[in-house]
Amino acid sequence: MLAFTQPVRGELPSVFEAKGVRVEIGDHTILHDVTFWIPKGEFVCLCGPNGAGKSTFLKAVLGLIEPSAGTIEVLGKPMDEAHRSVGYVPQRKGFDRSFPARAVDLIVAAIRGKWPLRVREAERARAIEVLERVGGAGLVDKELVQLSGGETQRVFLARALVNDPALLILDEPTAGVDAKGRAEFMDILAEISASDELAAILVTHNLAAVARTAERVIYLQDGRISAWGLPHEILGRKSFEALHASHAGGFPDED
Amino acid sequence: MDFFSEPLSQAFMVHALVAGTIVGGLCALVGVFVVQRGLAFIGDGLAHAAFGGIALGLLIEVAVENATLVALPFTVLIALGIAYVLRRGHVRGDVAVGVFFSVSLALGVLFLGLRPPEAPPVNIESVLFGSILAISPDDLWLVGGVAAATVIMLGLTWSRLAYMTFDPELAALSGVPVASLEYMLLALVAVVIVVSVETVGIALVSSFIVIPAATASMVGRTLTRVALISTALGVGGAAVGLLASYHLNVASGATIILTLGLLFAVGLAVRRR
């Protein structure tokens, strides 16, 4: 791993900790000994070329696949005990538009852990409150099929924030969103992360998103962390070229 | 009033109407989850698995009216097999269903061919297209019992099933037991299909699952409303189709499906999405 500025133990409490995470699928090792931690309130961008293991790592963090070795903890607890402390914004390229759902249903489902038959007044008020925070006031009763790409992602961000998480996980959240929508979304994200001291892991290919949000960057390559440091260190011309050399065309694209 | 009173003065038509409306409503209700999950093909797949099960029953010399009892566990096993393959994610849903579908059909043909020459002949037409006009009171009890059990199971798991249907990944992250629900849902669909096959036949049962649910999903605002509309369409389509077929003296199953198809066309015209 290239030595850059990493967070200092003891300064801030740890929110997220991955230790020696190894994931094997069939005969292939997708992740080798991935180890890093995130202090309270730090916004981390997880970058790397396609096939580097970013999505696999997210799945392991979310508990959707079981690592063959290592541990992943949120606030010192394994993920299955900590799921309410984690807000997740999925990639929404292939959103199923036939499901009859309103924004408020989606947000209340995250509060209750099941789909609401009827939304209570207090839950509706809470949904409106989080929607206002993400600039989505007025979307509460909209059906998801009526929303634009940017609006959809605001609703999913509101959903992720509704249980006051300590950690936000975002998987390419602005894929399929236009440039203006992307910039607005990233600004809202950076502002909320700062004001709530919310730690975040953002998986993205988008250099502008990294520049707007990242306090620390982790660069994953061939299933290993090849760099972990401050954005200007990783994205500085020299190191960027060094990282980039073995993976021409991989990271990051400027779309 | 002759439209109703004349056919209903005959016991076989009353039995047919009760069976048809229960099967129509039941298939339409489970169909909501099948259609919303993009598994419309599964109705056909499991109906053909039921054929394999019925043929197995006939091979081991179970009386033809009891072959359903062999088809039930056989079809549920196939459904659990499909659910397992879907969960492993090695192949796409339509491919998984397609493979199980053809293998079950082939097994059915094989089982029928292995029967001894002196075995009583099988009326393949009634297996394929159902024999709604020959439904016995015993069959009604079976269909009614399965309908009641299905409504109770769906009622108890409704809000979790709905969440899983919206997005299995998000539901799992909220603590919904997605794997168990998926196995339960497919097993339930298998049971519904097997008890419906006697009434509407292997070739037609999947239309009962897909058409009302697809129609309702174009007009309902919430999943619960979609389910209520779908069930009402299934019940209404079966009743109207059956009575129409009586007066027109044409095949009942086909007339019911054409009625459902007509309602689908109306749904397309007034759809909200």
Image (cartoon, rainbow, N blue to C red):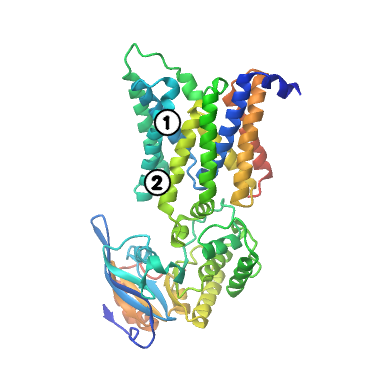
- Check the image and name the residue furthest to the bottom: A11
Residue B90: image tag: none
Q: Amino acid at mark 2?
A: Arg
Circle 1 or circle 2, nearest the eye: 1
Distance, label 1 to label 2, CA atoms, is 22 Å
Q: Residue at x 32, y 68 (%)?
A: A248
User: Callout 2: 10 Å neighbours few (<14), some, many (20+)?
Assistant: few
Assign a secondary structure to mark 1: helix
Residue B92: image tag: 2
The quadrant in which residue B64 appears is top left
The quadrant in which residue A136 appears is bottom right
Q: Residue at x 43, y 35 (%)?
A: B46
Query: In the image, are marks 1 and 2 on the same chain?
Result: yes
Q: Residue at x 40, y 32 (%)?
A: B49
The quadrant in which residue B266 appears is top right
Q: Residue at label 1?
A: B50
Residue A178 located left or right of residue A215: right
Mark earlier in primary sequence (1, 2): 1
Residue B49 position (above or below residue A76): above
Is residue B241 visible to us here? yes
Is residue B199 visible to us here? no
The residue lying toward the viewer, choosing from B186 and B249, is B186
Q: Amino acid at mark 1?
A: Ala
Q: Residue at x 47, y 23 (%)?
A: B127
Q: Chain of mark 2?
A: B
Q: Position of residue B211 (x, y in %)?
A: 57, 37
The residue lying toward the viewer, choosing from A104 and B96, is A104
Residue B78 position (above or below residue A157): above
- Check the image and name the residue furthest to the left: A27
User: Callout 1: 10 Å neighbours few (<14), some, many (20+)?
Assistant: many
The residue lying toward the viewer, choosing from B240 and B181, is B181
Q: Are marks 1 and 2 in contact (CB under 8 Å)?
A: no
